[in-house]
Image (spheres, rainbow, N blue to C red):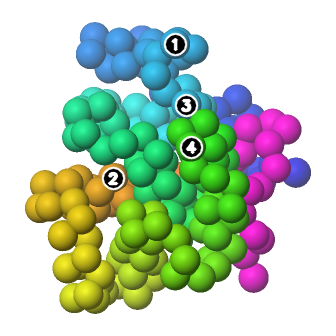
């Protein structure tokens, strides 16, 4: 049952923003979110619809998203794994459900997804997958990245790509916080993909 403070149309604690109250740039972004071919996994009924209540935030976040998704040179599988790790560390059901299928399509194996979902040991994974998961677990779980993890990640990716990886995770941590505060509900018919919180 949906909590009483959730708008039944938007699926979060605010109604959708009024398109006519937006400036032209924000209207274009609103329309892109509503377009099934607009490049958003979840459309207006997700973090984009929430962010449009602050149009400049929505527009500037979109610029960062475009860089991290298309221009940073991060392979799709690595990006999707980074997002799943972030969603898991924040227990973000909506974020997880929006990206689990995308991670599978990008080539992340079901076994690796289960490792992330249940926080299983990662010692036997390939170096790149190991480092993505370990970096996220240390950054968000321990609030400190060890010198060893940093050195291994720097050696593998170099300065710019390491910063871009961290920025993908930080960007989706920002999204997880927004989804949490505005209590974004899962789409109808979607089951939670993460273990229930204690």
Q: Earlier in the sequence, mark 1 or mark 2?
A: 1
Camera-nearest residue between 61 and 6: 61
The answer to which of marks 1 and 4 sits earlier in the sequence is 1
Q: Report the disc number at residue 81.
A: none
| Secondary structure character of the magenta stretch overall | loop
Distance from label 2 to label 4 (Cα)? Answer: 18 Å
- Name the element at disc 3: loop
- In terms of sequence position, does the residue under pointer 3 or pointer 4 come before the other? 3
- Is residue 81 one of those drawn in magenta? no
Pointer 3 and pointer 2: residues touching (CB < 8 Å)?
A: no
Q: Quadrant of residue 197?
A: bottom right
Please tell me which residue lies in front, 178 or 99: 99
Q: CA distance from mark 3 to mark 4?
A: 17 Å
Element type where label 1 sits in the image: loop
Task: Measure how far apart labels 1 and 4 are at the Cα level.
Answer: 22 Å
Mark 2 vs 4: CB contact within 8 A: no
Q: Earlier in the sequence, mark 2 or mark 4?
A: 4
Percent from the top left, x then y, of residue 55? Answer: 31, 30
In the rendered view, does 148 fall on the left or right side of 5? left
Q: Which residue is mark 1?
A: 37
Q: Which residues are magenta?
A: 180-198
User: Is residue 57 among what the camera can see?
Assistant: no
Q: Return the residue nearer the eye: 55 or 160.
A: 160
Going by the image, does 157 lie left or right of 184?
left
Disc 3 or 2, which lies upstream in sequence?
Answer: 3
Q: Residues within 10 Å of mark 3 (few under 14, many from 20)?
A: some
Residue 62 in sight from this viewpoint: yes
**Residue 179, horizontal then vertical, whole percent:** 54, 52
Mark linked to residue 41: 3
Q: Is residue 12 left or right of residue 3?
A: left
């Amino acid at each position: 049952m949906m909590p009483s403070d959730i708008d039944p149309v938007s699926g979060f604690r605010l109604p959708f923003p009024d398109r006519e109250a937006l400036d032209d740039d924000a209207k274009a972004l609103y329309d892109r979110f509503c377009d099934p071919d607009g490049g958003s996994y979840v459309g207006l009924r997700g973090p984009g619809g929430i962010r449009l209540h602050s149009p400049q935030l929505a527009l500037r976040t979109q610029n960062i998203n475009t860089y991290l998704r298309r221009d940073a040179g991060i392979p799709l599988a690595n990006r999707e794994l980074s997002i799943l790790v972030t969603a898991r560390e924040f227990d973000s059901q909506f974020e997880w459900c929006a990206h689990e299928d995308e991670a599978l399509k990008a080539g992340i194996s079901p076994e690796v997804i289960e490792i992330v979902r249940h926080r299983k040991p990662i010692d036997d994974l390939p170096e790149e997958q190991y480092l993505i998961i370990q970096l996220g677990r240390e950054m968000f779980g321990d609030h400190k990245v060890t010198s060893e993890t940093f050195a291994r990640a720097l050696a593998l990716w170099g300065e710019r790509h390491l910063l871009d990886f961290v920025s993908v995770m930080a960007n989706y941590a920002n999204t997880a916080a927004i989804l949490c505060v505005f209590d974004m509900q899962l789409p109808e018919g979607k089951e939670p993909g993460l273990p229930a919180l204690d």
